[in-house]
Image (tube, rainbow, N blue to C red):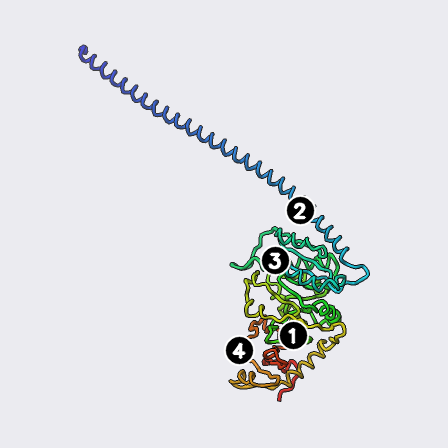
């Protein structure tokens, strides 16, 4: 049946509407894709820009790295040249200072770092008494670090050889919170002693620090002790220091003792001993390390009753520890002693053990809870026994002497016995350990 014109028009309208709808959708789709394409192009442009920026930054960093590497190479070359120059200056200085016709008793090294005023005070004290024996005791200053004032001060003394230890490696402590200074000090000591014993081939070295003054007989004392140190293998080092050398605890400037405790603070050792210690030198706390029984191996140390050095270093790596109570009151010897004619054979192990044992045995023993009070009211030498470290510390506090122990040994002790004078008098007080009399060979009744 034939369709009417109206139906055809409707069909055409529907087809036109469908076509228009399709075109609109197609346009919308194309517009959406066009927008996405535009956004993609913008994003790509941004990425390209960022990539170019990153490439530029990498390029700049590479240039900086190359520049730094070139700078490091130049600095290494300059450091090598500086090291060669310093070594040449050291060699010339040593050749100038050491008299070929005189065999040095010992090199004397002042360990310095960053205290130019302290260093000056120390050097002036040393030069005051060293001039007459300069050929026997060539002087060195060993500086740790690059402090310009210290270096200039050291180089201002024509009669002293300057050495400089520069270590740019970062310090790694073994325990959190430790002071890095103790690690630097230990490393500096090893470097300086290696230089003096191995490089410059000295037989003996006396080690001082940049906060010390010396006594008038300092050099004569060490010259006399050098022979003893050379010949007695039971002595590890000779010190100029007494931990209990405060004015009220000393009397006799000629008296010397053997001790199981390393005093430090102005001490001398010989090359064979250093060659033993150097390979196993600790990373830090070198002085406490020397005090370990496994290190000194039953060898002992010579110390004076009256100190031959005075430590004025209130400010340093130990933060002024013990200064007011123990260091400031130290008595520095001011009496002339003729050490050249002194017979020090009494310090040999067998002789000293016997004589010291007799001295302890002849002291009046005090017992009971009032023994400390009795000690103040007697006119003879006395001995008081302590039971253990805690008991020793209690007694030491009462009299005001050092309480500290290291590896089971009280400061200044010999066979567990600590001796000191009572109020600057000839009278001695002996603090005696529970096993001391047996070690001294003293028969107990």
Left or right of 386, for residue 353:
right
Question: First in sequence: mark 1 or mark 4?
Answer: 1
- Tell me the element at label 1: loop
**Mark 3 lies on residue:** 117
Q: Nearer the viewer, mark 1 or mark 3?
A: 3
Name the image quarter holding residue 233: bottom right
Q: Residue at x 24, y 18 (%)?
A: 17
Q: Nearer the viewer, mark 2 or mark 4?
A: 4
Name the image quarter holding residue 144: bottom right
Question: First in sequence: mark 1 or mark 2?
Answer: 2
**Mark 1 lies on residue:** 305
- Tell me the element at label 2: helix
* Marks 1/4: CA–CA distance: 21 Å
**Mark 4 lies on residue:** 398
Left or right of 31, for residue 218:
right
* Marks 2/3: CA–CA distance: 28 Å
In percent of width and height, residue 136 lies at 76, 63
Instruction: Identify the image quadrant of the C terminus.
Output: bottom right
């Amino acid at each position: 049946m034939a369709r009417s014109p109206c139906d055809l028009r409707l069909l055409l309208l529907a087809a036109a509407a469908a076509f228009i709808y399709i075109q609109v959708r197609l346009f919308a789709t194309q517009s959406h894709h066009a927008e996405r394409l535009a956004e993609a192009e913008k994003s790509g442009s941004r990425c390209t820009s960022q990539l170019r920026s990153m490439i530029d930054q990498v390029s700049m960093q590479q240039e900086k790295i190359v520049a730094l590497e070139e700078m490091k190479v130049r600095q290494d070359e300059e450091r090598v040249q500086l090291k060669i120059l310093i070594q040449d200056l050291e060699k010339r200085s040593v050749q100038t200072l050491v008299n070929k016709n005189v065999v040095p008793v010992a090199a004397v090294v002042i360990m310095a770092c960053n205290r130019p005023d302290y260093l000056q005070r120390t050097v002036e004290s040393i030069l005051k008494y060293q001039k007459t024996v300069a050929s026997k005791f060539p002087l060195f200053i060993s500086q740790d670090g690059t402090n310009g004032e210290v270096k200039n001060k050291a180089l201002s003394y024509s009669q002293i050889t300057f050495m400089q230890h520069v270590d740019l490696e970062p310090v790694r402590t073994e325990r959190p919170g430790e002071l890095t200074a103790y690690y630097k000090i230990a490393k500096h000591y090893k470097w300086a002693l290696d230089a003096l014993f191995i490089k410059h081939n000295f037989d003996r070295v006396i080690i001082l620090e940049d906060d010390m003054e010396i006594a008038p007989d300092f050099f004569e004392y060490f010259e006399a002790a050098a022979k003893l140190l050379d010949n007695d293998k039971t002595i590890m080092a000779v010190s100029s220091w007494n931990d209990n050398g405060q004015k009220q605890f000393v009397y006799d400037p000629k008296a010397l003792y053997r001790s199981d405790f390393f005093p430090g603070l102005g001490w001398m050792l010989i090359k064979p001993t250093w060659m033993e210690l150097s390979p196993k030198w600790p990373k830090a706390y070198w002085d406490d390390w020397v005090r370990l029984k496994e290190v000194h191996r039953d060898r002992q140390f010579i110390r004076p009753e009256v100190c031959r050095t005075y430590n004025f270093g209130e400010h340093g790596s130990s933060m002024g520890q013990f200064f007011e109570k123990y260091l400031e009151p130290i008595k520095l010897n001011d009496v002339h002693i003729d050490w050249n004619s002194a017979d020090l054979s009494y310090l040999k192990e067998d002789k000293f053990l016997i004589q010291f044992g007799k001295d302890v045995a002849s002291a009046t023993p005090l017992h009971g809870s009032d023994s400390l009070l009795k000690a103040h009211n007697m006119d003879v030498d006395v001995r008081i026994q302590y039971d253990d470290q805690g008991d020793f510390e209690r007694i030491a506090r009462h009299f005001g002497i050092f309480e500290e122990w290291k590896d089971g040994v009280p400061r200044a002790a010999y066979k567990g016995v600590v001796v000191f004078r009572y109020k600057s008098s000839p009278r001695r007080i002996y603090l005696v350990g529970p096993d001391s009399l047996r070690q001294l060979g003293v028969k107990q009744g």
